[in-house]
């Protein structure tokens, strides 16, 4: 059979794996903290229900599954001999508020369905196979940074346990109520010698693959991120009696700062800068704002560029505050470096994709992922999957059955290729 005919045969195969992936993702979407829309926050009742559901699926697939001390689902199937280093497949099952159903969940379910197919073929693997569903990738509820994957990487920060959500609940207390164990988190840290690698399938969350006409792409690097909480303080006063030139309006100052953030981000090659949330106090129609709190999210695939952007944004905000007679304070709560993913695993994913007739582009990720945390202790790589119009963190998030099938088959092929190479 010629190479073209072989590729055509692969493209024309049935979509049973993709259909199973989509069915499981649809089932998982029923676990939500808000009826009528998908919101599944870390350590919430919906997270617990989703974790139990996923653990059950993994157990029925022949894995020893458990929910660990930090709230992640971890499942293991031994290889040709007990105790071999593990190749880990997975992603996360927490979500943003009013989320789409594929972000994170796709990688967990693709890993599960790929593992089912690999085990059904019966060949012993020269490494253990693990499946993981992390619980805190989005960092929405608590002021954390990839806390559950960093727990496996031995980089969990104990002060995260004292962080509080918007209702004042401490992470430590929420974890105990969930059924986790704050004191058991240090023991989750993996010895790098026990991890053969980490592969994560994820929707692209951008338009590049759709523009390229390709179902999958290979992630070259993950952008570094700096996040900060900023406070602008002025003086609350009567909106009708204080002349414009005598005001210390925190909201007007914050508005100028937001535009400065946009301008500086646009001027920095490869960088993006976002103010995603503002809180105005006292928040009355007839009162000049006395305080505004806002968030900063600054990203770049080059850490030197990101550091320059952070410095310029802070300098601009301080200049605006001084000129307007306002106070300004900034507290950084996330500072993740950019991560170059493993060249060998990228090559394995690309070779698998090409064997299925695809031409996957290499592209960086502007979003952070659990792979960034695992890359600190093991080779890590990511397979991006095309999503409609690049929309994510939105109920309109959408992929096709065919693309889910393609991603799953590429993952299977990559794992078997790594097994063949390791056993050679």
Image (cartoon, helix red, strand yellow):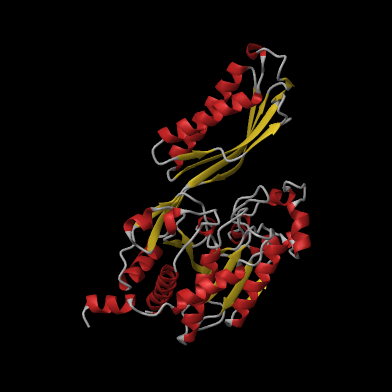
Query: Relative to 36, is 1 on the left or the right?
Result: left
> Residue 297's x, y, as percent?
54, 41
Give whichever of 326, 33 is nearer the camera: 33
| Rendered position, 277 above or below 417 | above
> Residue 282's x, y, as percent?
74, 30
- Quarter of the image containing the C terminus? bottom left
Q: Is residue 370 visible?
A: yes
Given the current orientation, which residue lies at the most extreme left position?
Answer: 2
Q: Is residue 64 visible?
A: no
Q: Residue at x 76, y 47 (%)?
A: 167
> Residue 246's x, y, as percent?
66, 12
Q: Residue at x 41, y 74 (%)?
A: 409
Give whichever of 130, 242 is nearer the camera: 242
| Rendered position, 173 above or below 322 | below
Query: Relative to 289, is 399 on the left or the right?
Result: left
| Rendered position, 22 above or below 183 | below
Give whichever of 278, 159 is nearer the camera: 278
Q: Quadrant of residue 347?
A: bottom left
Given the current orientation, which residue lies at the most extreme bottom position?
Answer: 122
> Residue 150's x, y, as percent?
60, 57
- Quarter of the image containing the N terminus? bottom left
């Amino acid at each position: 059979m010629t190479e073209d005919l072989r590729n055509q045969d692969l493209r024309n195969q049935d979509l049973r794996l993709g259909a199973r992936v989509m069915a499981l993702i649809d089932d998982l979407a029923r676990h939500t903290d808000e009826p009528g829309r998908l919101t599944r926050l870390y350590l919430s009742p919906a997270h617990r229900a989703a974790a139990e559901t996923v653990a059950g699926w993994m157990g029925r697939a022949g894995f020893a599954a458990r929910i660990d001390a930090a709230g992640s689902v971890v499942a293991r199937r031994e290889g040709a001999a007990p105790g071999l280093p593990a190749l880990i497949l997975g992603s996360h099952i927490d979500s943003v508020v009013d989320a789409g159903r594929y972000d994170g969940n796709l990688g967990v379910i693709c890993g599960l369905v790929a593992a089912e197919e690999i085990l059904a073929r019966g060949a012993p693997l020269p490494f253990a196979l693990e499946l993981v569903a992390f619980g805190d990738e989005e960092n929405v509820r608590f002021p954390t940074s990839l806390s559950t994957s960093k727990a496996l990487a031995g980089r969990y920060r104990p002060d995260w346990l004292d962080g509080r959500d918007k209702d004042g609940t401490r992470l430590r207390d929420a974890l105990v109520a969930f059924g986790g164990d704050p004191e058991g988190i240090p023991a989750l840290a993996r010895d790098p010698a026990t991890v053969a690698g980490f592969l994560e399938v994820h929707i692209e969350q951008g338009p590049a693959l759709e523009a390229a006409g390709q179902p999958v792409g290979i992630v070259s690097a993950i952008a570094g991120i700096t996040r900060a909480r900023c406070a602008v303080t002025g003086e609350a006063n009567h909106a009708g009696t204080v002349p414009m030139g005598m005001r210390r309006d925190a909201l007007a100052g914050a508005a100028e700062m937001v535009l400065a953030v946009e301008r500086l981000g646009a001027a920095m090659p490869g960088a993006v800068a976002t103010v995603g949330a503002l809180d105005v106090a006292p928040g009355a129609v007839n009162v000049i704002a006395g305080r505004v709190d806002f968030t900063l999210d600054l990203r770049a695939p080059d850490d030197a560029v990101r550091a320059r952007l952070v410095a310029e944004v802070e300098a601009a905000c301080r200049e605006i505050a001084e000129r307007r007679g306002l106070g300004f304070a900034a507290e950084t709560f996330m500072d993740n470096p950019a991560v170059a993913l493993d060249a060998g695993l990228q090559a394995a994913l690309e070779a698998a994709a090409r064997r299925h007739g695809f031409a996957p582009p290499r592209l960086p990720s502007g979003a952070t992922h659990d792979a960034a945390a695992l890359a600190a202790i093991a080779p890590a790589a990511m397979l991006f999957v095309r999503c409609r119009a690049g929309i994510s963190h939105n109920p309109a998030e959408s992929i096709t059955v065919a693309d889910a099938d393609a991603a799953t088959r590429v993952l299977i092929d990559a794992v078997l290729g790594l097994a063949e190479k390791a056993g050679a």
